[in-house]
Image: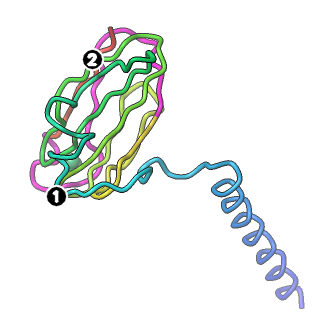
């Protein structure tokens, strides 16, 4: 009898937590950053967004700063990203091959990069200098050498 009661309590807790997650996703639009938009992984290099000329940091006409970075076996392109200090910036990542992951040391930037999706995170860098951006998702034999850099200027 006691067990049944505990079982019911747990059931209610699990349902409540699931409800919160669904509420966060649907009402507050909080969801993992790794699947903002779909993108064709095969034509990544040729897409409007992730062309060779487009990679790195760009300031658009209205002053918004966007950095586009390709995570690929076994490097980030560009390998060093320059970003402005104390300015909100949008980071967009895509992968043409396998799942990668990345974090930027000293910030809360941490996401997976899944082929077929654009991963988008927002950040403001408040510490000048260089900070490492390692891949943290095992992506093959060269995984441990996959290390990018962010230069905050
Ligand atoms: Cu890319 Cu590990």
Q: Nearer the viewer, residue 140 or 49?
A: 49
Q: Residues within 10 Å of mark 1 (few under 14, many from 20)?
A: few
For residue 69, what is the image quadrant? Answer: top left
Horizontal and vertical percent for residue 139? Answer: 20, 55
Depicted 131 relative to depicted 100: above or below: above
Q: Residue furthest front?
A: 61
**Which segment is the magenta one?**
122-145
Q: Is residue 120 above or below residue 150?
A: below
- Can you name the residue that lies furthest to the left here? 141
Few, some or many residues within 10 Å of mark 2 (<14, 14–19, 20+): some
As helix, strand or loop, the secondary structure at mark 2 comes to strand
State the mark number for residue 82. 2
Q: Quadrant of residue 15?
A: bottom right
Whether 56 is among the magenta residues is no
Cα–Cα span, label 1 and label 2:
27 Å
Looking at the rendered structure, which numbered label has been put on residue 27?
none
Residue 125 in the magenta stretch? The answer is yes
User: Which residue is rendered at x = 19% and y = 49% of the image?
Assistant: 44
Taking depth in this image into account, of 117 and 33 the one nearest to the observer is 117
Q: Residue at x 37, y 9 (%)?
A: 128
Residue under pointer 1: 42
- Toward the bottom, the furthest residue is 1
Q: Quadrant of the N terminus?
A: bottom right
Residue 56 position within the rendered picture, expressed as x and y whole percent measured from the top left: 24, 26
Tell me: is circle 1 under 8 Å from ligand 1. no
Rendered residue at 73%/65% (across/down): 19
- Taking 134 as reference, is 107 left or right? right
Tell me: is circle 2 under 8 Å from ligand 1: no
Residue at x 26%, y 42% (from the top left corner): 135
Mark closer to the chain start, 1 or 2? 1
The answer to whether the residues at label 1 and label 2 have Cβ atoms under 8 Å apart is no
């Amino acid at each position: 009898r006691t067990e049944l009661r505990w079982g019911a309590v747990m059931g209610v807790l699990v349902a409540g937590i699931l409800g919160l997650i669904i509420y966060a996703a649907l009402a507050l639009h909080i969801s993992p950053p790794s699947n903002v938009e779909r993108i064709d992984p095969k034509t990544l290099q040729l897409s409007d967004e992730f062309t060779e000329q487009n990679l790195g940091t760009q300031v658009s006409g209205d002053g918004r700063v966007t950095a586009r970075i390709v995570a690929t076996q076994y490097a980030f392109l560009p390998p060093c990203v320059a970003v402005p200090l104390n300015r909100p910036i949008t980071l967009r990542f895509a992968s043409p091959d396998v799942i990668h992951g990345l974090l930027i040391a000293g910030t809360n930037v941490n996401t997976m990069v899944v082929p077929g999706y654009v991963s988008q995170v927002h950040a403001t860098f408040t510490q000048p200098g260089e900070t490492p951006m390692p891949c943290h998702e095992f992506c093959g034999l060269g995984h441990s050498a996959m290390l990018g850099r962010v230069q905050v200027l």
